[in-house]
Image (spheres, helix red, strand yellow):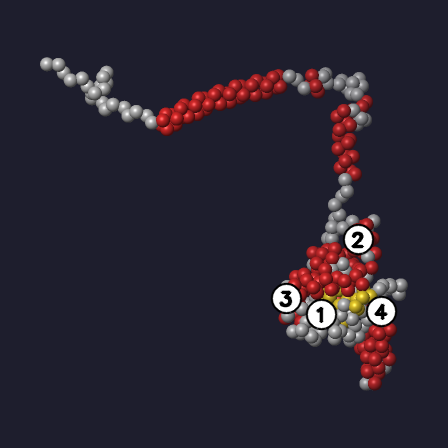
Amino acid sequence: MQQPMPPYPNHDPHHPPRRRLTRAEMRRRRRRRAIRRLAVLLGALALVAGGVSFAVTRLQADVPSASAASPAPVEGTGAVSSGVRNGTGAAGGTSTAAGTAESTAPAQPQNALGLTAAEAAAMLADPRMVLVNHQVPMPEDYTFDTKECGSATAINKTLQTEAADAFLEMQAAAAADGITVWMQSGYRSVEYQTTLYNNKTQQFLNQGYDEAAAREMAANIVNPPRYSEHNCGLAADLNCPEFTALEPGFEDTAAFDWLCQHAGDYGFILRYPKGEAAEAVTEITYEPWHWRYVGPENAARINASGLIFEQYIAELQSIAAAV
């Protein structure tokens, strides 16, 4: 009896027939084969490149350098070229050029402010940096123009023109942040300061003090003429609607907080800081309302130094003198 033919001729009946690959499977298989071939090719190229690199390295090691190949000079024979000995040969010229570049490079200033003598002198010559205090009067030839920037209730409504413009810009910036800042007292003429000082002196004279004692006591309250920063038109007493008095309580206002963060950007510094150490330098008790215009670039440097204005000026003088 004839046996029936298996459904798959020439196929082992003990193993199930292979499933026919779909087109997608065939494409994936071709891609895998192509990737394997590419990997083999890249590996071969890497081996070739490594061999070439090794060969080049060996060749370079085998070739003697120019200095090693040349005979060493014999002492007393003058074999060393005059160019190299005098620093004018190829090697000497290179080292000399490097040395010249190093010697001509500007040295970094070795002082607390990081300024050169010329930079320090320029800052001292800046009229915005004029120092006026109990010991240092405003120079007699110090002149300037003024501009009004004070509030409606201000006693002295003007500052130097540049300082007034800076204050108005700062005031507008504060207003944009919801903060109101007023300039309550600015420039005082020497004549006005003289009147204030003489009036205070007279009060002590009326109390029975002699002339010298009366003037000394008056100076503790009102600066003599030309010894007040207000005379130079760069000092501004600031307040706000929440605190109109020129008193230490101003430091508890949002206006003061804003000024501490932003006044330097507009060229103003807190002139009489808080603390016994600061007051020992300025000889003025803490005045959170008293701000001094020095210009934005100078304010940035002073604030970064952490020094009080008198200390900063002293540092500048020391640096400028070390020429």
**CB of mark 3 within 8 Å of CB of mark 2?**
no
From the viewer's perspective, is the residue at label 1 or at label 3 nearer? Answer: 3
Q: Gap between marks 1 and 4, in whole Å?
A: 25 Å
Three-letter code for the amino acid on which mark 1 is drawn: Trp
On the image, the x and y values in percent for residue 148 come to: 79, 68
Q: Earlier in the sequence, mark 2 or mark 4?
A: 2
Q: Nearer the viewer, mark 1 or mark 2?
A: 1
SS category of the residue bearing label 1: strand
Which sits earlier in the primary sequence, circle 3 or circle 4? 3
How packed mark 4 is, by other alpha carbons closer than 10 Å (few <14, some 14-19, many 20 or more), is many
Residue that badge 1 annotates: 182
Looking at marks 1 and 2 on the same chain, the residue that comes earlier in the sequence is marked by 2
- Residue 22: percent from the left, percent from the top? 33, 27
- First in sequence, mark 1 or 4: give its number: 1
Residue 105 badge: none
Give the residue type at disc 4: Arg
The quadrant holding residue 308 is bottom right
Q: CA distance from mark 1 to mark 3?
A: 13 Å
- Drawn side of residue 257 relative to residue 198, left or right: left
Residue labelled with disc 3: 178
Residue carrying label 4: 226
Mark 2 element type: helix
Q: Which residue is mark 2?
A: 120
Whole-percent x, y for residue 118 in the image: 81, 50
- 150 and 111: which is toward the camera: 150
